[in-house]
Amino acid sequence: MGKILNLGIIGVGVVGRFHLQALANQENARVIAVSDISDEALKIASERFRIEKCFKDYHDLLALKNLDAVIISTPPFNHAKIVCDAAAAGKHILCEKPMAMNSKEAAEMVEACNKAGVKLGICSARSRVTPQAEMAKQYILSGKLGKIYYARFTRIRRRGRPGIDILKESKWFLDSSKAGGGALIDVGCYDIDLALYLLKDPQPISVSATVYRGVGGRLRLKTRYDVEEHSSVFVRFKGGASVLFETAWAANMPSYQEYLIFGSRGGLKIDPFTYFSEKNGRGIALSYDLGRIDWNTLQELLVKDFVEACLEDRPPKTTGEDGLKTMQIIDMAYRSAKLNREVKISEI
């Protein structure tokens, strides 16, 4: 038997249990401990996944000498401190998305991990592990698109607000002091991550954005609700390319996703995967049925990549540096929406 990676999970609520289930199917990984401030969450995790070591204080988990890596699946307002503490303890880290509350925290996380010599992976990598993303990457690297000058990434939920329509027990999604923002930082981070991956890691230079909350009228809630339901974010990159990200938790439109990439020689629609170009002066469209990956399989691919990155001493699919760049774009977007003007990266 090859080397086994010993992991701990910090935060074993709904998302943490997704990680536990995915790791249960990995032959080269095992979870040896979990941590959560909730007694109920610890009880469910320990009984369902037969884990003996359960801690209320994550520092006790980090003190385990035979622990190699941790997955952090707490709300985002805890990410920066826990990541830095885990790095100081010499543990590799897979951190849930969004990476942090802002780019300042993200930069501190990257610095701490680089200083400690540990790997930092970000769970927005879920957007990179699909067959569609991999085939799009191959097409782009092969030069079939020519010069990429524009892309549009749209993700619309008719009604999918965490804490209201889904995950109703997780009200922290609605509070900017705990979540960092709404639709953009929560699920828009996936699309920004994918764009950075496909467009060959471009450098963002400025953002112009708008945000909106109020779909469906006023809600009667007992909790704070100060985050956006809709965002429109236009990003300019070094080299001339630009990308529009449209993201909505709620809209009076049908739910749909559409990712389009425009190149001088060809274009891509990511799902269903279609390549558009010309042949002998006539337009052509080549489509491929790559199937759909369910959430559980996506989760398994995510943790599999992280485990193998640690064991093979290579970067994970989405690195801390990638996550930092995503957070910089999100910071510029929120600042732009607040100031009602374009914001340059030098301003954050």
Image (spheres, grey):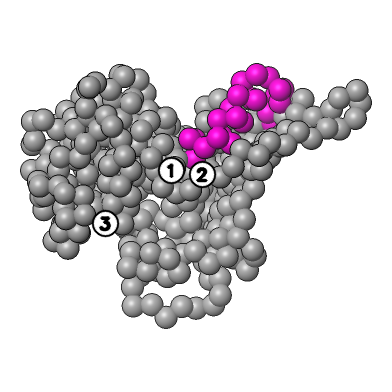
Q: Quote the CA–CA distance across marks 3 and 1.
A: 19 Å
Q: Residues within 10 Å of mark 1 (few under 14, many from 20)?
A: few
Which residue is most to the front? 1
Q: Secondary structure at mark 2?
A: loop
Residue at left 49%, top 64%? 160
Percent coordinates x, y for residue 165 in the rendering: 45, 69
Q: Secondary structure at mark 1?
A: helix
Identify the residue position indicated by label 1 in the image. 297
Q: Quote the CA–CA distance across marks 2 and 1.
A: 6 Å
Q: Quote the CA–CA distance across marks 2 and 3.
A: 23 Å
Please state the extent of the stretch shown in magenta in the rendering. Answer: 127-149
Residue at left 51%, top 61%? 249
Amino acid beneath label 2: Ile
Q: Residues within 10 Å of mark 3 (few under 14, many from 20)?
A: some
Residue 170, placed above or below residue 126: below
Q: Is residue 136 inside the magenta stretch?
A: yes
Disc number placed over residue 293 in the picture, else none: 2
Residue 348, by quadrant, is top left
Amino acid beneath label 3: Gly
Q: Residues within 10 Å of mark 2 (few under 14, many from 20)?
A: some
Which quadrant is the N terminus positioned in? Answer: top left
Residue at left 20%, top 59%? 44
Disc number placed over residue 13 in the picture, else none: 3
Q: Is residue 133 inside the magenta stretch?
A: yes
